[in-house]
């Protein structure tokens, strides 16, 4: 975090500063890392005591103090010998401090902010853009999937006076949440990747999902840039909602930044980038799954707007071989068996894309195995979407389907009902049962996809399989 005095922080968050028994004054400068996790506190850091659904961060404030926190931001004063700022709501205070820090760094004249949202692909696009921009100047980007009302501001608070680029991943489970993050960061560039059924149950329907994602571009300034997916009919109308200049990315000729001559293979996808200037660059993209090309195009469009040459973009993209752990992560190798662990999250769109990738990378004469768990947070769409994925698995010719958990059982039933599958689809209750079944049935050369929502816990199954066949 940039250096601020305790008095300045208190003013930014609208809180009451209490020095207590601490060896500090209102003019004491704090510049340590900000966190809501007491285990991450380092000497000089700032701890926000956040109340959660199942726990209260104030319980961990003593631990934060013991680890050397210079400041606690709390909702009630605590009997601890460390400076404290008392606020009505610690999460609101976290956002207020992030807003102040972004504004101060922006005032220095170098910072450019890029916001990224979409139902799928946010983390991959953020990581690609970070890799590209790190070659152009000091860059801060969200860690892991830090994209909500807590993770977003914590990322913003990593800014220093030297930061030139902030890549902020912005997610939501309700209308208004992206708008809140946009108001904090005030992006110069806003990217909308795709609008699908991910979290549709929480949003209350696809229309509300569209409305929430559009918040990325509605509040951009007239001098800003909205980077939109030309191939998504739910994203295209957002061009009429933003005062910013629109740049399109996609696979069609209408896109300003597009990809041509795609060749998918077992180690990624080769393609040629075409940018508005007419320049082109061939990319051997090492992230598995042809669907990730769209994420690469979105990152490219932003980078071009920021002045990065297309040749430099292509070179950076080729350095990335993994979107993120548990996202199309290629593992294994023994007996020529490949494990694709893509079980960090799942929506109908990402599940379909992963299955299509599995079918594409099948080795001649070898089998494909899909170990699939529940797609959560789909609400009223859950049943029909699990049905659809079961049908897709059959139509793609997946050799063996293993469905895990009651939440995904309809997927198994639909696969059986679709055709004359005698044992090609199996249902098990737990990841342990799935592990045993996979080990008992795999043959040399097989390719195995493990895919589910995070809540289904299959990412650890993917790790176990990957380690076994390493």
Image: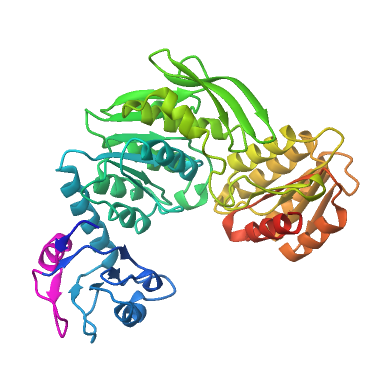
Name the image quarter holding residue 51.
bottom left
* Residue 193: image location, x then y, percent: 45, 35
> Nearest the camera: 48 or 176?
48
Taking 422 as reference, is 120 left or right? left
Q: Is residue 324 above or below residue 20?
A: above
Part of the protein shown in magenta: 5-27
**Residue at figure coordinates x 32%, y 79% from the top left:** 61
* Residue 449: image location, x then y, percent: 71, 47
Taking 465 as reference, is 196 left or right? left
> Nearest the camera: 261 or 424?
261
> Nearest the camera: 264 or 218?
264
Q: Is residue 180 above or below residue 278?
A: below
Name the image quarter holding residue 86.
bottom left
Magenta region includes residue 469: no
Q: Quadrant of the N terminus?
A: bottom left
Q: Is residue 293 above or below residue 213?
A: above
């Amino acid at each position: 975090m940039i250096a601020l005095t305790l008095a300045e922080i208190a003013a930014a968050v609208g809180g009451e500063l209490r020095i207590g028994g601490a060896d500090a004054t209102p003019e004491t400068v704090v510049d340590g890392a900000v966190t809501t996790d007491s285990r991450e506190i380092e000497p000089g850091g700032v701890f926000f005591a956040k109340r959660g659904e199942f726990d209260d961060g104030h319980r961990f404030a003593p631990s934060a103090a013991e680890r050397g926190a210079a400041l606690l931001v709390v909702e009630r004063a605590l009997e601890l010998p460390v400076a404290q700022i008392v606020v009505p709501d610690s999460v609101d205070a976290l956002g207020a401090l992030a807003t102040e820090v972004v504004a101060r760094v922006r005032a220095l004249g170098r910072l450019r902010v890029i916001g990224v949202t979409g139902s799928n692909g946010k983390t991959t696009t953020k990581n690609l853009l970070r890799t590209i921009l790190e070659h152009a100047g000091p860059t801060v980007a969200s860690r892991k999937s830090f994209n909500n009302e807590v993770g977003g501001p914590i990322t913003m608070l990593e800014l220093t006076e030297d930061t030139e680029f902030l890549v902020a991943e912005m997610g939501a489970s309700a209308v208004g949440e992206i708008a809140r993050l946009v108001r904090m960061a005030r992006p110069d560039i806003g990217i909308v990747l795709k609008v699908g059924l991910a979290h549709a149950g929480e949003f209350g329907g696809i229309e509300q999902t569209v409305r929430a994602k559009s918040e990325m571009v509605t509040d951009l300034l007239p001098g800003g840039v909205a980077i939109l997916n030309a191939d998504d009919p739910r994203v295209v109308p957002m061009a009429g909602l933003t005062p910013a200049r629109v740049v399109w990315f996609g696979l069609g000729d209408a896109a300003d930044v597009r990809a041509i001559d795609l060749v998918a293979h077992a180690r990624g996808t080769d393609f040629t980038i075409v940018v508005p200037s007419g320049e082109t660059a061939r990319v051997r993209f090492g992230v598995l799954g042809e669907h990730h090309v769209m994420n690469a195009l979105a990152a490219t469009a932003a980078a071009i707007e920021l002045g990065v040459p297309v040749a430099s973009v292509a070179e950076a993209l080729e350095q990335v071989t993994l979107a993120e752990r548990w996202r199309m992560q290629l593992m294994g190798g023994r007996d020529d068996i490949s494990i694709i662990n893509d079980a960090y999250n799942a929506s109908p769109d990402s599940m379909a894309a992963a299955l299509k990738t599995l079918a594409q990378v099948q080795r001649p004469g070898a089998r494909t195995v899909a170990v699939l768990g529940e797609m959560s947070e789909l609400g009223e769409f859950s049943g029909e979407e699990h049905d659809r994925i079961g049908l897709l698995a059959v139509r793609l010719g997946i050799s063996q389907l293993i469905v895990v958990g009651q939440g995904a059982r309809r997927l198994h039933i639909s696969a059986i009902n679709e055709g004359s599958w005698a044992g090609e689809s199996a249902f098990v209750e737990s990841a342990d049962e799935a592990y045993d079944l996979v080990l008992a049935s795999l043959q040399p050369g097989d390719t195995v996809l493990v895919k589910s929502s995070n809540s289904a816990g299959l990412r650890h199954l993917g790790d176990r399989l990957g380690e076994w066949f390493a």
